[in-house]
Image (tube, grey):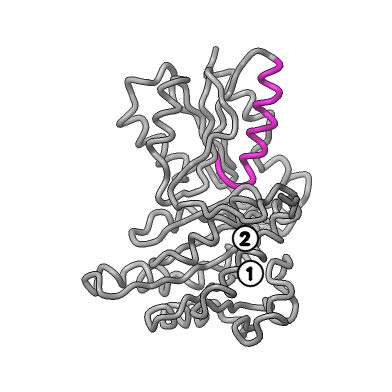
Amino acid sequence: MAEVRFGKAINLALADALEQDPAVFLFGEDIATVGGPFGATRGLHERFGDRVRDTPISEAALANAAVGAALSGLKPVLEIMFMDFMTLTMDALVNQAAKARYMFGGQASVPMVVRTPHGGGISAGPQHSQCLEAWFAHVPGLKVLCPSNPADAYGLLRSAIADPDPVVFVENKALYAMKGELLEQPEIIPIGKARILRQGSDVTVVSYGAAVHIVERAASQLAEQGLEVEVLDLRSIQPWDEAAVMESLSRTHRLLIVHEAVEAFGVGAEIAARIGEVGFDELDAPILRVAAPFVPVPFAPSLEKAYQPDAEAVIAAVRKLCA
């Protein structure tokens, strides 16, 4: 077992997929020569040649090319430099990739992956910091994944590349430098399975991506005050592990959902609505959410820090649930 950074785990997953499957190829803006804006594809062009390609700055063209390549039997892994730029891929992803299997009666599949970073923390401003995963989770035919640590980054990306349908693979920018343990033979993690990171009996807190670490910090502080929080990392947003959330709720009877994306109409809203419908009898308190306010992501570091959910907000919500 070795300690690797999140970005390196992504790199290893891509390298192993390229090594094991000749149908896999990577393309995107600055991913070959430079190694990507966050270094996740560094060294892959030297190792695999033209299977790792730089492209012009045209996200719409790239996404449509990926759909065509996937329909013809290849397994493209496309990198969109910032999730904000996914707006330019919407027709290809939402109207073509997501619908192809349905419209061809199951006779065609689109085995493509779109990797894209989201989230704040680096003062990149409102056009380079958005968390838009809820958009894509709303579309039938798309899968959406968001790992929180290096081992999950490797294991989920390998599953995404092997999946016969299109997957949006979301990587939080704040995590690229994060270190974590990775097995010599890393585990392949199935899509749609959440993981309990910390067991507790008072409140279930559901989260994903970088927000998981905010929740873990809050849970550690709350434990010192006598409140035991069960922390559940979704890992997969679409499909999400409803059974795991319900199982945890049956022990704690209180639910808090935490994510960096805007609260309104977000992933937390869907989970809250669904659990309110199927798990109402388990609830001893209203479901609460901690998320970003309904404003663009600020550029100024001080404002961005105030905008992003933090451990203090999680602690306050847990105390409210347990009052």
- Taking the image as shown, residue 268 lies to the left or right of residue 293, namely left
Answer whether residue 132 is magenta in the image.
Answer: no
Q: Which residue is mark 2?
A: 117
Discs 1, 2 touching: Cβ within 8 Å: yes
Marks 1 and 2, the one that precedes in the sequence: 1
Q: Which residues are magenta?
A: 207-224
The CA distance from mark 1 to mark 2 is 7 Å
Which quarter of the rendering shows the C terminus? top right
Q: State the SS at label 2.
A: strand
Question: Residue at the spot x=67%, y=28% of the render?
Answer: 218
Where is residue 239 shown, x and y percent of the image? Answer: 40, 50
Q: Which residue is mark 1?
A: 81
Where is residue 25 shown, x and y percent of the image? Answer: 55, 79
Question: Residue at the spot x=52%, y=22% of the render?
Answer: 203
- Vertical placement of 214 versus 65: above or below? above
Question: Residue at the spot x=56%, y=70% of the render?
Answer: 17
What kind of residue is marked 2? Answer: Pro
- Taking the image as shown, residue 311 lies to the left or right of residue 250, namely right
